[in-house]
Amino acid sequence: MTVNWFPGHMLKARREIQENAKVVDMVIEVVDARAPLSTTNPDLPHLVRGKPIIKVLNKADLADERETRRFISFFQKNGIGAVAADSLRGKGLPDVVRAVERVYAPLAKTLLEKRQRVRPARIMIAGLPNVGKSSFLNSLAGKRVVKTGAVPGVTRGRQWIRIKEGIELLDTPGVMWPKVENDEQGTKLALLAVVGEKAYEDEAVACYLISVLKHRKPEMLKERYRLESWDGEPGELLEEIGGKRGFFLRGGTVDLNKTARAVLEDFRKGGLGRLTLDRLPDEVNS
């Protein structure tokens, strides 16, 4: 599924990120731990002019723990700092602070050598819509400082937040890149509600999720939807799920749209269990 969802306000957000990059020391990119590669913005390194980037794999409570550890190792081996976090419960936040301090240490040392005052580390928070960026910032700051919501693009405005004596954060709006060319990545972004509802069809995305579960986590289908067999095609299984949930239209046919929305909601809220959609590059190519 090719996603072409780029509202006008996102062009303004890209410019804002470019301007903010001039006044920060590093960037924290918040990604969804269920798809750390698919929710990484490929344009970000260019937009921030090569500033160091720390990846925060947010919503780690919804992702497979083993896979999250593997992705963190993958990023670190490629010279990118990475930390897992569960912003709603405040887990992983001390690790984020330590990662920031490690990245900032060389600059602080340079300032001292020049006999200049070591100012707080200035950090820009970036990330795609709906990866939990605002919730992460609120949790890190220890108070509600930005509006949060489940609708892509809800965060607005610009503000500095000091979270401790040596760290200042600058929030930015969630921003997509202009066009997602890879079909599977686009479907994952839809599944994660990163793109707006008008950019995809619920039934197609639900069928993709069922296909993933069939091949990688069939026990989730069995436990959540009481399916005795998952040998059928994703569309057939979606219909069976709708029948078991009692989602019928007049005439007795299954309401596939309602069923698809219910399946997507189950995944997004963790009702299916912990699941990571992305795979490491060596696994995809093997």
Image: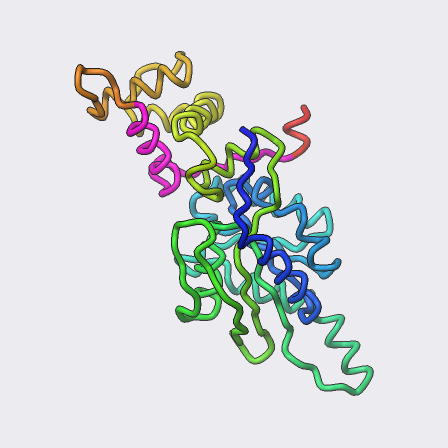
Task: Provide residue 20's location: percent of width, then percent of height.
Answer: 64, 67
Q: Residue at x 63, y 66 (%)?
A: 100
User: For the magenta stretch, what is the residue range?
Assistant: 256-280
Task: Provide residue 228's location: percent of width, then percent of height.
Answer: 30, 16
Task: Provide residue 241's location: percent of width, then percent of height.
Answer: 29, 22
Q: Residue at x 62, y 67 (%)?
A: 123
Q: Quadrant of residue 53?
A: bottom right
Residue 232 shown in magenta: no
Q: Is residue 198 left or right of residue 271?
A: right
Q: Residue at x 29, y 29 (%)?
A: 258
Q: Is residue 180 left or right of residue 205?
A: right
Task: Provide residue 63's location: percent of width, then percent of height.
Answer: 47, 42
Q: Residue at x 75, y 73 (%)?
A: 107
Quick one: 45 or 35, which is closer to the camera?
45
Image vertical order of residue 90 relative to residue 232, above or below: below
Q: Is residue 46 left or right of residue 275?
A: right
Quick one: 183 or 97, which is closer to the camera?
183
Q: Is residue 166 left or right of residue 239?
A: right
